[in-house]
Image: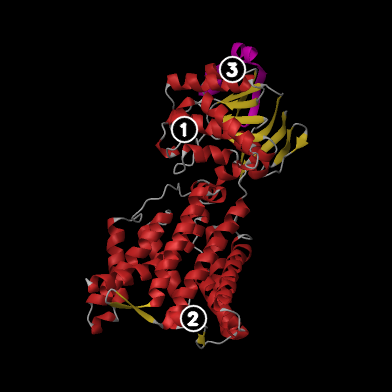
Amino acid sequence: MTFALQFLIDVLSLGGAYALMALGLVIVYGILKLVNFAYGELIMVAGYTLFLVGGSGLPWLVMAAVAVLMAVIAGILTDYVAFRPVRAKSVTAVLITSFAFSTLLQNAALLFISPRPRNVPMPAAFSQTVELAGVITPVRNLITIAAAVVLLGVFTFLMRRTVLGIAMRAAATNFTMARMLGVPANLIISSAFAISGLLAGIVGILWIGRIGTVVPGIGNEPLLVAFIATVIGGMRSLGGAVLGGFLLALIDTTLNYTLSQELLKFRDAFTFSLVILILLWRPEGLLKGPATGQRT
Amino acid sequence: MLEVADLEVRYGAIQAVRGISLTAKRGELIALLGANGAGKSTTIMCIAGALKPAAGSIRIAGEDVTSAGPEAMIRKGLATVTETRDVFPDLTVAENLMLGSYIRRHDRAGVTEDRERMLTLFPRLAERSSQPAGTLSGGEQQMLVIARAMMSRPKVLLLDEPSLGLAPAIVDQIFEMIGVLKRSGLTIVLVEQNIAKALEVADRAYVMRLGRIAASGTAGEISAATDFNAVYLGG
């Protein structure tokens, strides 16, 4: 029982983080049919903002809010710098510009801050543990689960109940038709990048909270995780991204629990083998989106 | 209400529309006829703002809207029903209609009134209001896209092949609705393969061939003077 609860908390906290990462990536993909490779850098921006405002003496929540806000701004900036100027040109052009923007941000961090890990301020709760029905678990895991539940709830409400959300879902299936109904393309795309930045910012703080430091490449792993989760879940479906995130966390956690110490360093090899099997079984991903897949 | 002059549209090196001029007065229904590849849908998509014209001009109620994008076109009073019957499949019927009124979403009373009007006109949609649009039949989807276009309270409605792939009984219903909309004072441009049906409701008609207007006149003149076998089968 204790073991089951421990396992459940681990899967849900890791899965919550993975799901949010995947959702941030797929919200942009759904509308533009393009992967934003600068997505990991939004997490980096949140991390370094938290590091830079660390000495300000502000309450932690205010600093965290500033960090998330910077990630949102960086997200919108990605649209203006990497996507909007070349959107009408070709897929290749946008892939290259988004890679370039990613490299630019990482190198800016290397050059102007440091290649070495920088400590970010985290509230004491992040390093504490709590006993829950006989299970000792880090408080940050419970915070991550709570944040994931709240954000998924807010996100669902936004996409299902608000005009902007419904317009975004419409634009994801048929962008031209949405525009013909008067839905402004730029508003929809910028909103997608802003939501992507919001999710990256929050999940970034939770992610960085696990290790307490930020490095220029901090966003690489979240980008990879988000990408794999969306591929498993189905690139065209928001629900698929969430499902993929939790499934990936389930695989990772199961391997953590079952693999021996020598094999554990090959965990990613096992994970990716399973991902390949899933894709052989369902090449489109687990959930098929409604999208026609036309590019905008 | 709608004036198109010397419109030319290119897809790269291919010139699909080679200087089309047409006009539709307020409350008039004009039909645009012609074989596959004559350039009818290209003309419609260009008027709708989804394709940029290479030359020519488009005016709505006297205002030049030639280079306006699709988002602007609907604000100028022009709504389009595309040939591909583009419902948003995972959105419900009600949500599809709501997006139709996107540009006037703050006029809640007016939107509610129009929605009631459309659901009265298309009772099938009322029954399926909370169903995803992708689960509707072809005929119901056609009704939905027409109703959705009407939710913007357009002055001009472009209808591209509303009868495409539908059962004859449904086609009759759709044309009945088009007649109702026309009588409400709406200006309609109708592209249609079903010539007999189109000429029944149209005031005037234009026949397109290879990107040009081959003939134009009142619906009566066109149906009397045009050899449609030649137009459609080549000759």
Q: Residue at x 42, y 54 (%)?
A: A237
Question: Which residue is tagged 3?
Answer: B201
**What is the magenta range?**
B211-234
Question: Which residue is tagged 2?
Answer: A123
Gap in angstroms between the C-alphas marked 1 and 3: 21 Å
Left/right of residue A290 with respect to residue B202 in the rendered view:
left
Question: Which residue is tagged 1?
Answer: B141
Report x, y in % for residue A253.
30, 72
Pick whichever, B142 or A82, lies toward us: B142
Res. B167 in view: yes
Look at the image and name its color scheme: secondary structure
**Of labels 1 and 2, the one closer to you:** 2
Picture layout, residue A190 above or below residue B8: below
Q: Magenta stretch containing residue A242, yes or no?
A: no
Quadrant showing the N terminus of chain A: bottom left
The chain containing the residue under callout 2 comes to A
Q: Quadrant of residue A86?
A: bottom right
